[in-house]
Image: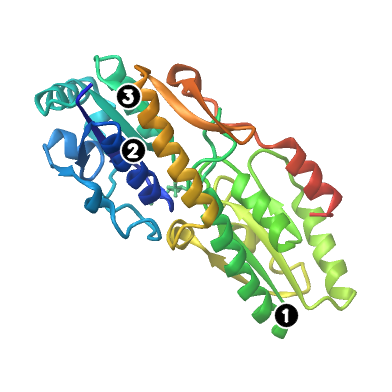
Amino acid sequence: MKRIAVLTSGGDSSGMNAALRAVVRSALSSGLEVVGINKGYKGIIDRNYAMMNTRSVSNILQRGGTFLQSARCKEMMEEPGQNLAAENLKGMGVEGLVVIGGDGSLRGALSLHRRGIKVIGIPASIDNDIPYTSMSLGVDTALNNIVYAIDCLKDTASSHDRAFIVEIMGRNCGYLTLVAAIACGAEHALIPETPFDISRICENLRKRYREGRDNSIILVAEGVATAQEISNRIKDCIGFESRIMVLGHYQRGGSPSSFDRLLGSRFGQGAVQALVEGESGKMIGLSASKMKLTDLEKVLTGKIRPIDKSMVELSKSLDI
Ligand code: F6P
């Protein structure tokens, strides 16, 4: 193998730059040439790319987002686009590809593997919905962002005897909402994976209000409902005056945490090593603190990573 390419695809997440840097630098130290593809799979279709050297990835480790930019590429969801992408990569002399992104991006990676390109995927998504890795890249930074925001909200909530209903990203996965609730001491976390009872929630909030508590924080995963919808259902029966907050894309940005810088670096180096060793059609993941490869076929069964039962138990014992 002489030349590999790397791209970031789908929703960005903090730590993608650390992974790009590690891919480029470890490939160069293994004697490989590296092509950086701009704007995800769209960059393969449009032949939008540049050769990378060690300086190309200087001073990006501490930056959120992705310096190669990202996109959700409709063409890659259909066979003609997948065929064109494989042809274009071959035309660029690319024999191996590292794809950094979420489940949709890994699906694109699998389609290229089936067309003869050697591919390794790196799981990167704040949702933490990808199975066969205990953490995806960007989750830890997003969690820190959420906790910071909620600490701020608690200050103002406590000054006014208010409840805040906060909407958290995660698509159909409640991981971020659940762990954020534990980390910031929220009163309730509404997630898609476990049932909840709105009247019990209202009763509990009323009780808190009667007891003289000066704030309440209710987190709602976007896969359950909007903060506005939950607010409409509870605002008149909780005692507290309430406000909503949609954290939105704020959660995805910002300087990556040390954990995500390390994870991105490990994923990037591990992906290149896998390509050098002749692996393909696999995702690198974090398992029991070690790097582990899993077949993309197995990762992409359509089932999201099940919610961590120990976190659900922990939240229950903390009365969330
Ligand atoms: O998958 C990452 C994610 O941030 C989800 O949590 C969210 O539902 C979605 O992407 C938002 O997508 P977009 O950036 O296209 O608005």
Mark 2 vs mark 1, foreground winner is 2
Q: Secondary structure at mark 3?
A: strand
Q: CA distance from mark 3 to mark 2?
A: 16 Å
254 with respect to 90 (left or right):
right
Name the residue carrying label 3: 119
| Quadrant the N terminus occupies | top left
Residue 8 visible in the shown view: no
Name the residue carrying label 1: 158
Q: Quadrant of residue 8?
A: top left
Question: Do tag 2 and tag 1 residues touch (Cβ < 8 Å)?
Answer: no
Please state which of residues 313 and 52 is positioned toward the viewer in this rendering.
52
N-terminal of the pair, mark 2 or mark 1, is 2
Q: Residue at x 61, y 44 (%)?
A: 174
Q: Residues within 10 Å of mark 3 (few under 14, many from 20)?
A: many
Mark 1 vs mark 3, foreground winner is 3
Q: Residue at x 25, y 19 (%)?
A: 117
- Figure check: 300 above or below 56: above
Q: Secondary structure at mark 1?
A: helix
Q: CA distance from mark 1 to mark 3?
A: 51 Å
Mark 3 vs mark 2, foreground winner is 2
Q: Label 1 amino acid?
A: Ser
Q: Label 2 amino acid?
A: Ser
Please state which of residues 171 and 116 is positioned toward the viewer in this rendering.
116
Identify the mark at residue 26; answer none if there is no mark. Answer: 2
Q: Where is residue 118 shown, x and y percent of the image?
A: 29, 20
